[in-house]
Image: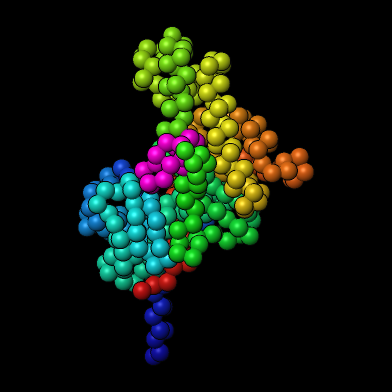
């Protein structure tokens, strides 16, 4: 009697994507279409060994999987080494990929910058789906980004491409944690909006923004500006117009370099919706080179929210080699 040979065991189809942030580690298991099917969250610890332990714990909780992608906040080289991470104290030159492969030797592992991963997710399954040339700009405490050119992810010679927030827009501007002065993110991030809002609130101490902050102009933050602007407060609307010009200035510079079809704005500030997008679009039209003589570049809100980085990491993991 002949027995049929046992079927070959194949790796599970689902992939794991992890978005490691300054405060939380978000892991997702996704199916072949990038749709999340399971989630695992842990606080981000301090120190290299503890970070690797949290990543490994997340993989174990969500596995088994055919591939693992990790998005981390900092400069990641093409070998998967996190060279510099300003929001992860004590983590320098951490070989994330090698550390995970040592624990999961039969799984493909890829490591990229977190905003780069988010950009890939928005291009593949989010707001820029169908576009061959797109730029994601994440507007949060700082500014990150991901660039898609001719359908391919731009990583640069060393893997460091996409640090859009550190484009200098004012050489004599305020100091940036990166060591330079006048970086775009000093003006066009959440902290930049907060600074503009506090200046306006100090000049109008009995205005709506100060009122939303409990009557203290020094306590005004970006969210107070967007909320007051949504109510139609003229001072807050002026703040948003000023802020929109700073955002648009950076976008115009990026448009002159990359000529994308679409800019996707992500990060926490995008929750403001049209209160943010309207002044950005209005200012961009007058700042981009030959604006009246080129096709319109769409400026839209991201659609994947806080899951974008993890989804993008999972999608990119499918291209990673094992070992």
Total numbered badges shown on the rendered structure: 0
Residue 97, horizontal then vertical, whole percent:
34, 65
Q: Position of residue 133 (x, y in %)?
A: 63, 54
What residue is rendered at 46% in x and 29% in y?
Answer: 193
Kindly indicate the quadrant of the structure image that contains residue 251: top right
Residue ID at (45%, 58%): 160
Is 25 displayed left or right of 321 in the figure? left
Residue at the spot 29% in from the left edge and 60% down from the top edge: 94
First to last magenta residue range: 173-189
The furthest residue to the front? 172
Nearer-the-camera pick, 193 or 28: 193
Q: Please give the name of the residue rendered at 42% of the width and 16% of the height, measured from the top-left corner.
A: 202
Camera-nearest residue between 153 and 83: 83
Name the quadrant of the N terminus.
bottom left
Would you say 154 lies left or right of 289 here? Answer: left
Residue 125 on image: x %, y %: 55, 51
Q: Main secondary structure of the magenta part?
A: loop
Judge left or right: residue 83 versus residue 50.
right
207, above or below 153, in the image? above
The furthest residue to the bottom: 1
Which of these two is toward me, 209 or 301?
A: 209
Is residue 82 on the magenta stretch? no
Q: Position of residue 5 (x, y in %)?
A: 40, 84
Q: Is residue 98 in sight in this rendering?
A: yes
Furthest-top residue in this view: 206
Magenta residue check for 176: yes
Q: Quadrant of the C terminus?
A: bottom left
């Amino acid at each position: 009697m002949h027995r049929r040979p046992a079927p070959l065991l194949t790796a599970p189809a689902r992939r794991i994507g992890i978005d490691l942030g300054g405060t939380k580690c978000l892991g997702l298991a996704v199916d072949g279409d990038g749709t999340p099917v399971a989630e695992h969250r842990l606080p981000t610890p301090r120190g290299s060994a503890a970070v690797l332990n949290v990543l490994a714990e997340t993989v174990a909780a969500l596995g088994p999987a055919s591939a693992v992608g990790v998005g981390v906040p900092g400069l990641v080289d093409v070998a998967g080494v996190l060279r510099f991470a300003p929001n992860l104290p004590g983590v320098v030159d951490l070989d994330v990929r090698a550390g995970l492969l040592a624990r999961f030797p039969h799984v493909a592992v890829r490591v990229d910058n977190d905003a780069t991963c988010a950009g890939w997710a928005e291009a593949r399954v989010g707001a820029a789906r169908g576009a061959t040339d797109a730029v994601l700009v994440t507007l949060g405490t700082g500014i990150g980004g991901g660039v898609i050119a001719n359908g391919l992810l731009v990583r640069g010679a060393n893997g460091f491409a996409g640090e859009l927030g550190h484009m200098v827009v004012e050489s004599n501007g305020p100091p940036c944690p990166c060591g330079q002065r006048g970086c775009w993110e000093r003006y066009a991030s959440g902290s930049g909006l907060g600074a503009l809002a506090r200046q306006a609130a100090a000049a109008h101490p009995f205005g709506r923004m100060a009122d939303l902050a409990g009557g203290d102009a020094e306590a005004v933050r970006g969210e107070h500006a967007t909320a007051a602007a949504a109510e139609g407060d003229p001072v807050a609307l002026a703040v948003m117009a000023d802020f929109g010009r700073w955002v648009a200035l950076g976008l115009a510079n990026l448009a002159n370099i990359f000529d994308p079809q679409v800019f996707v704005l992500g990060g926490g500030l995008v929750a403001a919706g049209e209160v943010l997008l309207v002044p950005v679009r209005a200012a961009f039209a007058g700042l981009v080179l030959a604006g009246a003589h080129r096709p319109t570049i769409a400026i839209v809100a991201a659609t994947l929210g806080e899951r974008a980085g993890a989804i993008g990491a999972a999608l990119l993991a499918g291209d990673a080699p094992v070992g």
